[in-house]
Amino acid sequence: MSSRVPPMTDIPTHWQSSGPAHYTAHLPGGDFTFALSREDVPLRDICDLALRNNARRRFLFVSRVLGRHHPVRPAALRSVARQLAEKLHARLADQPVVFIGMAETATTLGQAVFREWVALQGRGLYIESTRRRTGSEVALGFAEVHSHATAHALHLPGDIEDPEHWLQTAAQIVIVDDEATTGRTAAGLVRAIQDWRNAACAEPVPFSATLAVLLNWNPCASEGVDPAITHIESLVEGRFDFTPIGEFPTPPHTQVVLDTAVQCRRGVRHGTVRPEVLPGHWATLVHAGHRPEATGRPNQELTSPTPRVLVIGNGEYGFHPLLLAEALESTGAQAWVQATTRSPILLGGAIQHHRSFPALSGEGYTEHLYNVPDDHDYDRVIVCTEDALPPADHPLWRLPRVEVCTWANTSPSPERSDWIATDLDGSVFSRHWATGSSGRVPVERFWPVPGTWRQRDAGITGAAVVGDDQPPNPQAGTEPTAALSNMESHREPSSWVPAATHRLLVALSRAAALVPVTARDAESFARVDVPLLHLRGPAILANGAIVLDWNGQPDAEWQSRMSALLEPWTVRLETLCAKLIERTGNAARPRLVESQTGLPAYLVAKAAPGWWTSPEGVVIQEDKDLWAGCRIAVLGTELQALPGGLGKREATLFVQEKYFAHQAPLLCLGDMPTDLAFMRLSGLLAVPAGSNLEGTWQQLG
């Protein structure tokens, strides 16, 4: 680490007022003059000044409210976000808006403005530009020519992130940044979006672009606003002039391409129609200190009744840290938030301390943290990264009273770093597998093992009041009672795992986590209990509408995404149920499968064996108007209709990213052709003999 960058010093900015709304400022290396036409927030409350180690642009406005280079209270950031959102809402409230947060400085501000927009009942999509790659499709690229890292990208949202396809169709786009000096970068982004729409859309939708910033220095001197920008909203507006003084150090090399060494999470880089929520596994940071297994440091006793906590984001990753700071303040702590950055800034003015270290992401560039000296007065310093924890010898660990947490909720057990994704019904267990494959009584080691259970009615022996479909009654003397010797008397098996499958899964589970990927909802999944197998979480339920974490609790971030996806479908799915009853004359019995968001996830309609392949059933399936926007599949006696964007594959990708650090499953198991969507995420597939999927492959062969 380094504490200063010669030849600059840590002398603070010297401000003077030369009249109403006129200021001068001096710091080692340069002089500023300001003439302001509007201050919704006083200039000196909203920013301080510093010098970049960048030959293209020497000056820097260091925000006091942004939470980037300078620690700020969450309320200050939320206040300016609210003011910008209110200005935008006054003009754009009656239409969906695409909000774009500019990396890396304005990503936290961008989503904070979007959060306030949603609180004002606005509709829209939030998405961030990025200098990183998620591994998924990039929609477009553009350049920030004055930057130390010029390349930016906008990734393509999926149906989950942008169910209404607003990136393609919205007539209003708002670009959120910290300040506008010339507006060229924002204008370049606008033109890149126009070019992308022209190429990607059969009938491109024209749009207007608004730039929302804290400081608006545009137009500067004789330059006017770029015509690509139709409007600018800001909290401070005026002109400034900067005169450099003396020699500057040699700037570092400019990066002109995106980072590709480490795949980053999708998150808001692919968009969201609802603001992100606090990662559920961070609750221990809020209520009971940090987890030793997450930080690699022992718990520290906090003696202050009102602990002072600094929460530090990592590069583009800033909104979750803001939520953590807000959550800490809700418990009585005093919290501040800021973030690490790629920006090389010289000591002096607003920058009173500087430390640098290898990027926490592992990308290889140098990362910087400003104004957090070793003699800081915080009780806790919590660094939040969206990537893996830094290695034990990383310089960041030398920061006094530091803790590090990650967005990724990886296994607390090293032996669970690998994983296997498996469908359940028909792949692991079935109600038809109560006897051996020959139908004869197998020897004990080949007895099938219970897979799911149903409750026994206490008053009528053998009568089930809650549970799965009734299993076939084994012939007298053939029920594998030895397998039930330790089972509770108030329940009985309703489906079975073949003995060979069970032995294989037990062996695999010693080296890898087993992740169920099932159409079962939470209630029916609770009846799954296979001896010697941990299947409680992570788990994917309801065809991807529910993701459970390691503790079997719903993943809050996924719930938020599903709420946004499923809410527009609620009435539509209810209407589909009524239409199916009417169209089929009650031959099909539709019901809605619940998610854990309080909204229905998808529709399933049961019919008699063979009905869905009958002429009447085929006609229903082929009615494109009836199923518009849905994905339908017939699985035996059931038809499933899933809203566009919902699916096992999408949820499996999320689990892969968040719970297994982007590592693909070693093996995927499934029994239906529809399972191939998630199974193809692995290079090795397993299919039960005699399954529908095996039959399909045989037909193709």
Image (tube, rainbow, N blue to C red):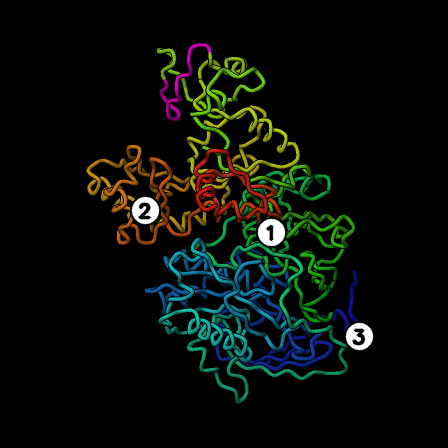
Q: Amino acid at mark 2?
A: Thr
**Up-down relation of residue 519 to residue 502 (above or below):** below
Secondary structure at badge 1 equals: strand
Magenta-drawn stretch, dominant element (helix, strand or loop): loop
Whether residue 594 sits left or right of residue 282 in the image: it is left
- In the picture shown, does residue 681 fall above or below 79? above
**x and y, in percent, of residue 648 in the image:** 47, 45
Which residue is at the far front?
A: 701
Judging by the rendered image, the residue that carries numbered circle 2 is 570
Which of labels 2 and 1 is toward the front?
Answer: 2
Q: CA distance from mark 1 to mark 3?
A: 33 Å
Q: Amino acid at mark 1?
A: Ala
Q: Which residue is mark 1?
A: 335
Q: Residue at x 38, y 11 (%)?
A: 461
Secondary element type, mark 3: loop
- Secondary structure of the residue carrying tag 2 is helix
Direction from residue 14 to residue 2 in the image, left or right: right
Region in magenta = 464-477
- Give the percent coordinates (x, y) of residue 698: 47, 41
Marker disc for residue 7: 3
Question: Can you give x and y, in whole percent of width and height, for residue 605 in the image?
Answer: 31, 38
- Tag shown at residue 267: none
Q: Earlier in the sequence, mark 2 or mark 3?
A: 3
Which callout, 1 or 3, points to the residue nearer the camera?
A: 3
